[in-house]
Amino acid sequence: MNTLCSRLRFTAIVAITGWSVAICVQQPDRVSQLIAEGNDYSEKQFDNQKALDKYLQADALSPNNDEILWRISRTYVDIGEHLPATNDEEQEKQLETYQKALDFANNAVTANPKNSMAYCRRAIATGRVALFKGVFSVGGLVNATRDDCLKAIELDPSNAAAYYVLGRSHAKLVEKPRIIRWPLGLGWGNIDDAIKNYEKAVSLRPSFIMYHLDAARAYVENDDYAKAKVQLNVIPALAKEDEDDDQFRKEAKELLDQIKDK
């Protein structure tokens, strides 16, 4: 009897151990599948809520995974950008969404301080919060955006998004004269660096409409209409890679019409 019981216990332990090993083997595959599904919703179908649902499921299975965390941050920014903001309540909800994006980006950086995209997404989320609150009233956030872009580029010199956000930061700052910005610690912004970083982003990802459009705007700001036209004339032939590309095409056409005789 004792021998039989021992055998039964051994069989049960083997079965449980085998089941546990099978779960451990299957879980990474399930996480990868959820990330891939989230990417498809985010980058192909432009369904941000479904993308978020997939990433959150992956996060539940694999906590503190930087690749999941920065994607969740990206999705909250995408959601926030398309929320209505016509009254105080709606604006508060939008700000809360950007803050969630920032929280997840912070977590991504903590989880892996060597992840270039984690810093880039933190820069984007920080920039969104700064724009919401008013760039020239939150100089510390703007400087943090710049610093994260530079760190992202240091870690991965091919990170097109980091160059773009850095260029956009420069472009936003030059909306006010340097003499006004300087006491705020924002004197570093200049149009030449905006253009340089936009050009780098375009060279790394020439198929992305938004990069061409904002590069063209910077060229117009610098009175370089010929180069602006080059950027704008590329856009009609590019495929849709962002949910806002239809609007960007419209804006590009309007800008091209404005400068056609310059």
Image: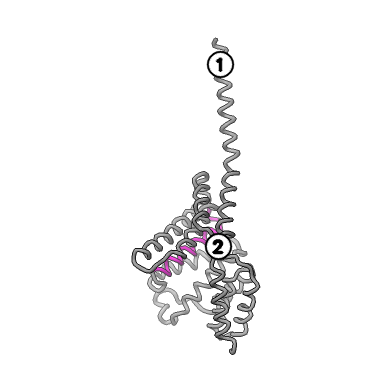
Q: Is residue 67 left or right of residue 137?
A: right
Magenta stretch holds residue 113: yes
Outermost left residue: 88
Q: Secondary structure at mark 1?
A: helix
Q: Residue at x 63, y 78 (%)?
A: 233
Q: Residue at x 58, y 44 (%)?
A: 30
- The x, y position of residue 12, in whole percent, is 56, 23
Where is residue 20, by image quadrant? top right
Classed neighbour count for the residue bearing mark 1: other residues with Cα under 10 Å, few (<14), some (14–19), many (≥20): few
Residue type beneath disc 2: Ala
The mark found on residue 6 in the picture is 1
Q: Residue at x 53, y 52 (%)?
A: 68
Q: Is residue 157 left or right of residue 93?
A: right
Instruction: State how many labels appear.
Output: 2
| Residue placed most toward the observer, 177 or 11 | 11
Q: Which range of residues does the magenta coloring cover?
A: 112-132
- The CA span between labels 1 and 2 is 58 Å
Up-down: is 33 above or below 132?
Answer: above
Q: Residue at x 59, y 64 (%)?
A: 159
| Residue placed most toward the observer, 223 or 140 | 223
Query: Which color mode does the image show?
Result: one colour
- The x, y position of residue 60, in whole percent, is 49, 45
Q: Nearer the viewer, mark 1 or mark 2?
A: 1
Residue carrying label 2: 152
